[in-house]
Image (cartoon, grey):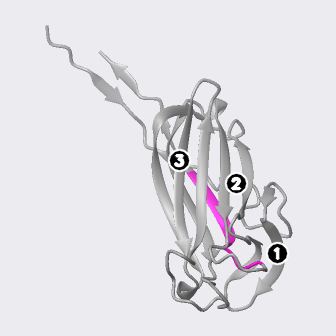
Amino acid sequence: MLVITAIQTVRATETSNVLNNGSFDGNADGWDLDGTAEYDGNTYSGSGLDKVVRFSGSEGGSVAQSVPLNNINSDNKYISEVHGSIKSYGCNNGGKEWCSATGTDDNLDPVNTTITFTDGTQSETLNYDFTSNYNDGVITSTFTINLQNDFHIDNTTISVNVFGADKGNQAGRLGSIIDDLSLILTLDDLVIAQQ
């Protein structure tokens, strides 16, 4: 007996940025700051950085946020992909040097992003790590990651954690600087197999 299966899908849609206050406008409201993470309301002319979070020390710190998705109006939608971006600036300090050293494994400041999806029955963790080199100036790092499991938009919560540190471990706020965090979700309709 031959069985023919037709799969019906509908074009994917994308959300807007689901993060609350990803640009740290006026403060760090919506974020939990831990360790050496510190809000900095200064404007750095010529850099494009304005109202940022800075990290210090080799132990570093993090900013974290829990994002419930049940307020997104998308019936029967599942999350298939995550698109993110982070603006950052590193320092590359080491020894007695201040933000001028050539970037090496010993002094490039890390920015490590962990995104965890949970729906009450399953969870999935995605990671995106990069280093920020002072000699590159302010960079915008972007990523796209596919989810392996099905997470329905109505009952899923996302936990976002961004870690930064000063690999050179000098006194002062000479670690990673982050700004303009964005997290956009690609939503697909439930796939219905017909026989």
In this rendering, the label closer to the viewer, 1 or 2: 1
Q: What residue is pinned by disc 3?
A: 126
Kind of residue at badge 1: Asp
Give the magenta part as a residue range.
Answer: 173-184
Crowding around mark 1 (Cα neighbors within 10 Å: few <14, some 14 to 19, many 20+) is some
Distance of label 1 from label 3 (alpha carbons):
28 Å
In this rendering, the label closer to the viewer, 2 or 3: 3
Q: Residue furthest left?
A: 1
| Residue at 74 percent of width and 50 percent of height | 65
Q: Position of residue 89 (x, y in %)?
A: 63, 78
Crowding around mark 3 (Cα neighbors within 10 Å: few <14, some 14 to 19, many 20+) is some
Kind of residue at badge 3: Leu
Kind of residue at badge 2: Leu
Q: Are marks 2 and 3 in contact (CB under 8 Å)?
A: no
Q: Are marks 1 and 2 in contact (CB under 8 Å)?
A: no
Q: What residue is pinned by disc 1?
A: 40
Give the mark nearest the N terminus, 2 or 3.
2
